[in-house]
Image (cartoon, rainbow, N blue to C red):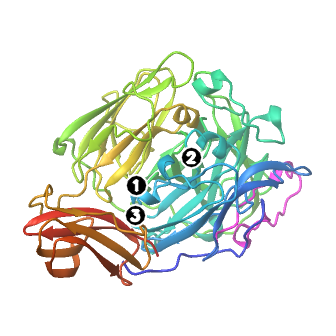
Amino acid sequence: MKRRDFIIKSSLAGMALVALPKIYSQDSKITKLQVGNPLRFPPELQEGESLKFNSANVEVWPGTTTQVLALNNSYPGPTIRVQKGDDFSVLFENQFTEEATIHWHGLLVPELMDGQPKDAVQAGSNYTYSFPIIQRAGTYFYHSHAHHLTAKHVYKGYAGFFIIEDDDELQYGLPTGAYDIPLLIQDRHSVYQPQFNYAPNMMDRMLGYLGDIPLVNGTPDAFFDVQKTLYRFRIVNGSNARVYNFGFSDNSQFWIIGTDGGLKDEAVPVSNVFLSPGERIEILYDFSPIDIGNSVSLQSQAFSGIGNQGTLMDILRFDIAGDSSSGGVVPQNLLPIDYYDINDKTGTRTFTLSQAMMGTGMHRINGLTYDMNRIDEVIPFNELEEWKFINSTNNYHPMHVHGVLFQIYSRNGNTTLASNDKGWKDTVLVKPNETVQALVKFIDYSGTYLLHCHNLEHEDDGMMLNIKIDTPTNIEDENTSPNNFELYQNYPNPFNPSTTIKFKLTNAGFATLTIFSLLGTKIETIFAGNKSSGSHSITYTNKSLASGTYIYELKVNGYALRKKMILLK
C-alpha cells in the first residue's frame, strides 16, 4: 500500500477546549438566543505529534476548571483525521500514574495495535501505534481500554474522534467543510459539577454510570450557530452507559446516511433513532425551513427504560444565524453494500448475556467473566458465522466486537430492521430480553481480539471475552508439527526497519526462510540453502513494505513452521 501522510486541517494542539478552528467559526448574527455556551471542537492532531496521556485542568464550565484525564491536555482528545489508504503512526506517551492503552474503536488493525488490556502501556512508558488505514471512510473514535480502568478513564475525559475520509464520497454531494460537524456526546453528574468524579455505587455498576448533564464535544449547555441549509452531523455516543433516543425538538425529519462502518447504501428518513454507547451514526439535517433568529434542539427523547435510562434531555441547540448554502444534497443512492446471505453461514455461535447476584463479576457472557490469559472462542478466518446475542437480563447491552465489521440480520427473529441497524456495524444494542442475530466474517487480521459489552461499567465488571481468530489458511500447510527444528519469535517485534529471526536445527538440512502477507501472498524469500545443525540467526530488513502484520515461514526438508511479526513505520 502506497504511503500517504494523514491530513491535518488545524494547527491547534496541546490546548484544553480551545477556541473554534476557523472551519467551524460561529460569527453570530443574533443575540436573543445567546444563552449557554458555544459548541467547542478539539484540536486536530499534527503530523509527527505524539499523544501524551496525563491529568489536566481544563475549562468545561465557564469561570472554573475541571480535572480531567486527557491526551495533550485536551478534552475531548485531539481529533485524528486521515485518508483511506494512509499509513497512520503515532507515539503514545503514558505520563499518568496508571497503565493505559489506546483502543481504536471500529478500526481494523493488527492485534498488537488494538490497544487491548493485555497490551497496556505502563505508567512512564510509551508505545508506537502504527497501522494502515484499510477500511471504508467513516466516523470512528478512540479511547482507553485498560483493565478495570476503562470506565474511569473514559468518564474522566479520555476519548476522541478518528475520522477516515475518502475522495470517493465527493460524488454524492454531501455537505463538507464547515457543514460537516462531528459531535461527541457524553453525560456527566451535576451533583459533582464542575468535577468529573467517578464514584459508582453498586447500583451504578449494575445499570451503568448515568449522568444528568449532556456534554457535546465537552461543552455543557451547548449551542451552535447554523445557516438555513443542509448539514452533515457525525454523532458518537461516547457515554459510559447512557442510551440516547435522538430526535429534534419539533419532531422534524432527518436522514440517516451512515452507521458504525461508514456510509449506508441509501439515505433513510426518520424522526428519531436509538444510539447506545460505542455506536455512531451520520445524519443529514436541513435547517432551511426555520427562520433566522429561531432555533431547534437536538434531544434525547423520552422512552421507557430501567433506572434513569430514557430521560428527556436537551442535547444541543441550533440557532439559525444566516442563509448561506452548503451546496449539499440528500443523495438518492449511496455506495452499494454487499450484504451477507445467512444461507452461506458455516456455523452458529451463541453468546448468552446474564447477570449474577450483585457483587463483583455480576455481568457475564456464557457464564464467564473476563480472564486476560484465557481464550474463550476460536473463530475461523474468512468464514461467515451467525452470532446470536441472547440477553437474559433487563439491562441494555451494547455488544462490541474488535477486529471486524459485521451485519445485523434480525431482532427477535424479525428481519425488518431499523435504519441504524442496516449497514456495517461494530457495536449492536441488545435490548432487555432480546435476541439479536448478526452475520460475522473476519477477513482482515488474525490474532486475539475482544468481544464485550460497551456499557463500560459492565465491561470493567467482567462482561468481556477473548476471541482468537485463526491464522489464515491461504499459505500451503504441508506439516506444521516438525520435531527436528525450532523457530523463535523475531526480535525486536514490532520492528522498523530490521529484525532478527532465530531458529535451531537438530539435523543439517536445506532450509528456506520466506515472508508472506497475512493472506498468504509470497513477498520474498530471504534465505534458501543448506544449514548445519545448531542455532542460526538471520537479519531481515525491508524498507518498501507498508506497516502491518506479516508471516515468516521456516521450511526444512519439506516441513514448515510459521510465526507472525509486525512492521511499524
Rendering coords of residue 246 (x, y %)? 59, 40
Q: Is residue 218 visible?
A: no
Q: Which amino acid, by three-letter code, is at mark 1?
A: Glu
The residue where tag 1 is placed is: 266
Q: Going 63% across and 34% down the picture, which residue do you hit?
A: 301
Rendering coords of residue 59 (x, y %)? 84, 54
Category of crowding for the residue at label 2, using alpha-carbon neighbours closer than 10 angstroms: few (below 14), some (14–19), many (at least 20) = many
Q: Nearer the viewer, mark 2 or mark 3?
A: 2
Q: Going 65% across and 54% down the picture, which residue do you hit?
A: 123
Q: In the rendered structure, which segment of residues is drawn in magenta?
A: 18-45
Viewer-proximal residue, 456 or 179? 456
Q: Going 45% across and 69% down the picture, which residue do you hit?
A: 169
Q: CA distance from mark 1 to mark 2?
A: 37 Å
Q: Which amino acid, by three-letter code, is at mark 2?
A: Ala
Q: Is residue 44 magenta?
A: yes
Q: Does dot 3 land on a helix, a strand or a loop? A: loop
Category of crowding for the residue at label 1, using alpha-carbon neighbours closer than 10 angstroms: few (below 14), some (14–19), many (at least 20) = many
Viewer-proximal residue, 33 or 400? 400
Viewer-proximal residue, 25 or 90? 90
Which badge, 3 or 1, comes first in the chain's sequence?
A: 3
Q: Are marks 1 and 2 in contact (CB under 8 Å)?
A: no
Rendering coords of residue 563 (x, y %)? 28, 62
The residue where tag 3 is placed is: 135
Which badge, 1 or 2, comes first in the chain's sequence?
A: 2
The residue where tag 2 is placed is: 146
